[in-house]
Image (cartoon, rainbow, N blue to C red):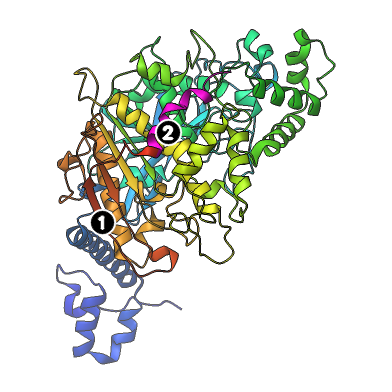
Amino acid sequence: MRFSRPSFAPFGKSSRKANILTVFRHARRNPRDFISRLWCPRTIARSLVFLSGLFVIGTTIFEILLYLRTGKNSRIGTTVINPFIPLARPRVQIHQGIYRGGTAKTGHVFVERFLGIPYAQTTGGYNRFMPPVKMTAGMGKHDARVWGYKCWGGPDGPDQRSGDDCLNINIWRTRGVKKDQNVPVVVYFHSGSFNFGSGAERDIASFVAWSVDPMIGISVNYRVGALGFLSSNITAEEGILNLGLQDQAAALEWVHENIHMFGGNKDRVTIWGSSAGAHSVGHHLMKIDRPARFQGAIMESGAPTSRSVYPYNHPLHEEQFKRFLDLTGASDIPDESKMTHLRSVDIETIVAASESVFQQYASSLRWAFQPVIDGPGGMIPCAPLESWKARAYHKVPILTGFNTNEGSMFIDTTVDDPKEFDDFFRTLIPGFTDKDIRELNELYPDPSKSPESKYTEDRPGVGRQYKRLARAYGDYAYIAPVRHTAHFASASDFPDDGPVWIYQFDVNQTVIRGANHGDQGEYVVNSPSVRNLRWSRHNEIGEQMHGYWSSFVLSGNVNDVKKGRVKNRSTWSQYGRRGSSAKMVFGEHNNQRAGGENEGLLTENRPDLWGDAEGDFWWARTMLTERI
């Protein structure tokens, strides 16, 4: 039986084509054959195309309205997309091969990313406990959509495993950036006490995505623990001190040679770090026997003078090295063969020994496997304080600062006996005299003996010594060193110095820890974890901090309003020497995340009281932690 095609007399002889609208119009005049006309294959096909077009137009209008409503993106092309066309995978060819990246979406903004690109060869086999080895030329094709290996140390993450082939970087760029476009670049070094962590630590994608102008953000994996910072006379003789810092330097050299292929400007690079990453940035500032591969520096809660930076042969390092040898079966091996043995031991034994030694010294905060003074030609040629005094550092713009409660996360909350306060600092800084301890107690008065002490503790379950010990340790380890940087690098006395800006972050995250070490990180990048909070004040703080930080990366000036998304930012005064210091305070007294109702101040530019007695005390004793 043959089926004849339904007749569309009303428009069959017309130039109009059948689609869902014409069928419904015809149905109103000829209801009997409505069904036959509706199910015509040609009508169905044309109707699907028509509806698809409406959907695309509607989506586009929605995206444009979203842009006009929020003002979150200055490039319409990065948000208005055809939902039926997959995003093209970015592709970059460099001397070591071809890398195909991917795209990531944060908020409503897309960025392009290239993950796990090697900047040096594997650290396995003979390359273990050796300086980084430069990549060789190649033409292979590589998938750069997934994280590469992180370096050994600490637990693996859901997207990252540990491995020897870990010297890699991750690159995020504003969507649409092309080769040789020369956009600014920022390179981030992660935290982790020089024993843990990875380049996945911070949401660099968010930082790049919310920038008004195009930029490239990079995070670096570098060796940590014993594999990166094994210090002793033996490792010094082999020339393998501060390998983790050498890795970072190799990454910066790779960026200098290759970033133009990704659209970056090798002469507009900012190095950036938090905690251990900030200490690292400080050490690169003082590596003046080679050209600086950066033009700006951001140091959050860290500095080259932070904590202790001893010579490589300090008794503490030799003691920790001996313990490491015991755990790896190398104690009885001749000195000249010890490193050969350690290169042959299975990696699981090396990692377990490294973590065991670190934990043995963790409670005293005399951490194992730290950067050391390795002498002329090394990564840290002399005591950092001496480098500051001799003006032996690269003169670049600096953004640095600290959190109000830097020491709170490192101290046992139950500490209650005044003797524990004294014993803690005698162990931490063996060079302390009885006079030093007496003066320390005067500066941080014991609340159990002085009811008027500002360190009185009334929180349930918290020891009476916790607040003052946390404050004293935070001043010693982080706040005083940050002010070292601001003081010595400020431009008020020497015209060749770069400008310096210093901040204080005061948003309380918890009742006990307060504005803790590292808490600023998610605000600086304007992370979804901040943007999605139910309190608008946090979104405002995040936008303000991201605006200042991104302005600094884009132009070297935190106050370049054109380079920040928030147009009404306060002018952030530069830091000067004593008597002319200033800082920007973010979120002072905000306690909403800690269960309170005070939204506090958004920002305030005010004098920084560097000359207080506590600061002077730690200033005068810095060299106790930089010599044998």
> Please, what is the three-letter code of the amino acid marked with disc 1?
Leu
What residue would you read off at disc 1?
602
Q: CA distance from mark 1 to mark 2?
A: 31 Å
Query: At 54% across and 38% down in the image, what residue appears?
Result: 192
Residue 580 is at least partly visible in this image = yes
Observer-nearest residue: 348 or 192?
Answer: 192
> Please, what is the three-letter code of the amino acid marked with disc 2?
Phe
Quarter of the image containing the C terminus?
top right
Q: Is-magenta flag for residue 349?
A: no
Query: At 32% across and 24% down in the image, what residue appears?
Result: 260
Looking at the picture, does residue 136 appear above or below residue 407? Answer: above
Looking at the picture, does residue 439 appear above or below residue 66? Answer: above
What label sits on residue 617 in the rendered view? 2
Q: Quadrant of residue 3?
A: bottom left
Query: At 38% across and 21% down in the image, what residue appears?
Result: 285
Q: Residues within 10 Å of mark 2 (few under 14, many from 20)?
A: some
Residue 301 is at least partly visible in this image = no
- Residues rendered magenta in the picture: 614-628
Q: Horizontal and vertical percent for residue 314?
A: 62, 19
Q: Horizontal and vertical percent for residue 386?
A: 42, 16
Q: Secondary structure at mark 2?
A: helix
Query: At 27% across and 61% down in the image, what residue appears?
Result: 56
